[in-house]
């Protein structure tokens, strides 16, 4: 890949066609988002008279203020706080328990280690969607409906991150642990002073992936947050549609959709390298 | 693979794995066990007692035309989502790979829709195709086409497929572009010297060398279409019209939470567990082969 200037790349007319093809693709990808952005800056009357305008109007502040402050069932600002708590809770919680258990599996020999390893292996790839009814009953039994812990814990119960850290710890040279032991460091000192700093990039990459995963959850919050003030923003949008024949308040709904995209988009674009790395790592 | 150097201790490692064990046991193994257990029973209408029916729930499900129809719907839906999103992503990745400069810019512009939640993607597409105010449906009306996904099952399927595939283009594009850029340019140039045109080179060299990426994406996309598209279906069609977009995961939700048919919903969960297990095995077998790529 060092020298990308080969003889088969296009120049002149072909190059323009390549750009044109890519731009058509970009338009397809961007059009729905553009339309949402436009709809969030016009009035309900503009939308109810199809076709709606394709350029932004001047009701940006009005619509976004209405969404954030009053919303429809609950203020969207509050739903964003709920989403943030849930996404951070899932990302940090999963990283912490996975780091600890991966450390134990790799650096200790303890009875039941293999069994434990296979047990967590079983949890790989089994999404919460598959076991919703019994998981809901467990959470309800603990009285965790409409609570942050109910939103967070069931989604931490999988082992992808443990696997990832295990793979990484296996590549850490044995000499480091040996030196730490010779110097009389306790296992936890080794973990804190050597292993953790070495895992920084892996942790950050995983954080990006888990944050987006947590922020974008839909089915689980839909089931366990019946109280509008506990709704997350992604699931709250659907709740803004009226049942029956009333007209939906499109400008506010679209403003909410845009608000729901902003935090994860900032994370993806702002941490692009970590994001790509996390994506590739977590699929290995 | 084992570490040569380890620490001594018994209680410390057990303490370290404890949080994960507890959370996994309570929120994973116990519910999964419950699903298997409940699938063998039918609760009475008042929910006071459970009647043991053995594999009765499964027999009933497999004989139930609605459930069988949901299998077919899921198959059609997953295949369409996978083909559409991978097709568009491959097309864009091949184009971006031909650029000497600027492929990074396109990558940045194309990856961020990955961050858009399936449920939000559903709302965006619902807005475009809304029968009353949708821009696209309005222009289709001008062309003489009367779009109505609320009544027409095929149009509803088309809409949920496009909305689901749209959100997946970024992901597939990233992996295809990485796969394409890993193919040595010398191989392609050698073929070009021998007179192979672009399409011949793509068919005989690029696509075969890309096959590990393609297989990997096939599995991942099918898993996505099976499980993560719930938000799209729920926001756009709620499984309708006449169950024409009720995929298996949606049916577990509809029967278990809306219909309160716990035995049937649990049996459906077990069938899904089985399908996920199969897909996981396929993925792991495949990933072993991917290593020497």
Image: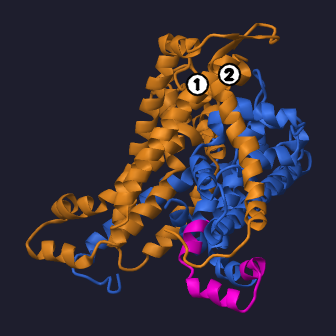
Chain colours: A blue, B orange
Where residue B69 appears, x then y in whole percent?
47, 18
Indicate the quadrant where residue B235 lies.
top right
Numbered label attached to residue B26: none
Q: Are there few (<14), some (14-19), or many (20+) residues within 10 Å of tag 1?
A: many
Q: Which residue is mark 2?
A: B38
SS type, badge 1:
helix
C-beta proximity under 8 Å, tags 2 and 1: no
Figure check: B228 above or below B40: below
Toward the viewer: B214 or A155? A155
Query: Which residue is nearer to you in this view: A171 or A128?
Result: A171
Q: Quadrant of residue A231?
A: top right
Question: Residue drawn at (40%, 46%), measured in percent from left and top?
Answer: B282
Left or right: where does residue A204 sit relative to residue B77?
right
Q: Residues within 10 Å of mark 2 (few under 14, many from 20)?
A: many
Count of marks overlaid on the render:
2
Q: Residue at x 91, y 50 (%)?
A: A69
- Is A147 located above or below residue B152 in the figure? below
In magenta stretch: residue A187: yes
In the rendered image, is residue B131 in sight? no
Instruction: Please provide percent x and percent y for residue B200.
Output: 16, 61
Q: Mark 2 or 1 closer to N-term?
A: 2
| SS under mark 2 | helix
Q: CA distance from mark 2 to mark 1?
A: 11 Å
Q: Nearer the viewer, residue B293 or B9?
A: B9
**Residue closest to the far left:** B194
Q: Bounds of the magenta span?
A: A165-192
Judge left or right: residue A254 versus residue B112.
Answer: right
The label shown at residue B268 is: 1
């Amino acid at each position: 890949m060092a020298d990308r200037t080969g003889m088969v790349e296009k120049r002149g007319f072909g190059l323009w066609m390549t750009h044109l093809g890519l731009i058509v693709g970009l338009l397809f990808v961007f059009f729905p988002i553009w339309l949402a952005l436009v709809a969030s800056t016009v009035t309900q009357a503009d939308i109810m008279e199809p076709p709606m305008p394709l350029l932004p109007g001047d009701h940006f502040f009005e619509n976004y203020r209405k969404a954030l402050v009053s919303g429809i069932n609950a203020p969207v600002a509050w739903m964003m706080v709920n989403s943030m708590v849930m996404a951070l809770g899932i990302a940090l919680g999963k990283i912490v328990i996975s780091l600890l258990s991966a450390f134990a599996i790799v650096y200790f020999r303890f009875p039941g280690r293999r069994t434990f390893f296979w047990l967590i292996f079983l949890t790989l790839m089994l999404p919460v969607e598959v076991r919703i009814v019994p998981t809901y009953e467990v959470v309800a039994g603990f009285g965790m409906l409409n609570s942050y812990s109910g939103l967070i814990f069931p989604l931490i119960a999988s082992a992808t991150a443990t696997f990832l850290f295990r793979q990484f710890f296996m590549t850490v040279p044995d000499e480091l642990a040996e030196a730490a032991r010779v110097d009389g460091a306790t296992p936890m000192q080794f973990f804190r002073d050597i292993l953790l700093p070495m895992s920084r990039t892996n942790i950050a990459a995983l954080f990006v992936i888990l944050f987006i995963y947590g922020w974008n959850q839909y089915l689980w919050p839909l089931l366990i947050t019946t109280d509008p003030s506990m709704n997350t923003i992604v699931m709250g949008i659907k709740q803004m549609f009226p049942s029956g024949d009333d007209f939906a308040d499109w400008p506010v709904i679209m403003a909410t959709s845009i608000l729901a995209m902003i935090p994860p988009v900032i994370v993806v674009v702002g941490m692009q390298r970590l994001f790509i790395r996390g994506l590739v790592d977590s699929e290995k | 693979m084992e570490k040569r150097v380890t620490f001594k201790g018994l209680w410390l490692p057990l303490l370290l794995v404890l949080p994960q064990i507890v959370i996994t046991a309570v929120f994973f193994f116990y519910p999964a066990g419950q699903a298997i257990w409940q699938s063998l029973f039918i609760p009475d209408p008042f929910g006071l007692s459970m009647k043991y029916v053995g594999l009765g729930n499964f027999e009933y499900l497999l004989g139930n035309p609605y459930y069988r129809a949901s299998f077919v719907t899921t198959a059609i839906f997953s295949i369409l989502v996978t083909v559409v999103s991978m097709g568009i992503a491959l097309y864009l990745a091949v184009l971006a790979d031909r650029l000497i400069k600027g492929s990074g810019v396109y990558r940045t512009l194309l990856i961020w829709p990955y961050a858009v939640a399936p449920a939000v993607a559903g709302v965006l597409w619902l807005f475009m195709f809304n029968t009353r105010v949708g821009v696209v449906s309005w222009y289709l009306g001008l062309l003489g086409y009367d779009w109505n996904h609320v009544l027409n099952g095929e149009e509803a399927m088309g809409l949920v497929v496009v909305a689901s595939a749209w959100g997946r283009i970024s992901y597939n594009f990233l992996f295809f572009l990485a796969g394409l850029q890993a193919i040595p340019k010398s191989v392609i140039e050698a073929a070009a010297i021998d007179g192979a045109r672009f399409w011949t080179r793509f068919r005989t060299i690029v696509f075969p060398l890309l096959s590990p990426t393609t297989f990997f994406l096939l599995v991942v996309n099918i898993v996505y279409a099976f499980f993560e598209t719930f938000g799209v279906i729920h926001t756009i069609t709620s499984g309708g019209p006449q169950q024409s977009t009720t995929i298996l995961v949606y049916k577990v939700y509809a029967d278990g939470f809306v219909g309160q048919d716990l035995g049937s919903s649990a049996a459906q969960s077990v069938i899904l567990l089985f399908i996920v297990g199969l897909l996981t095995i396929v993925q792991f077998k495949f990933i072993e082969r991917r290593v020497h790529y």
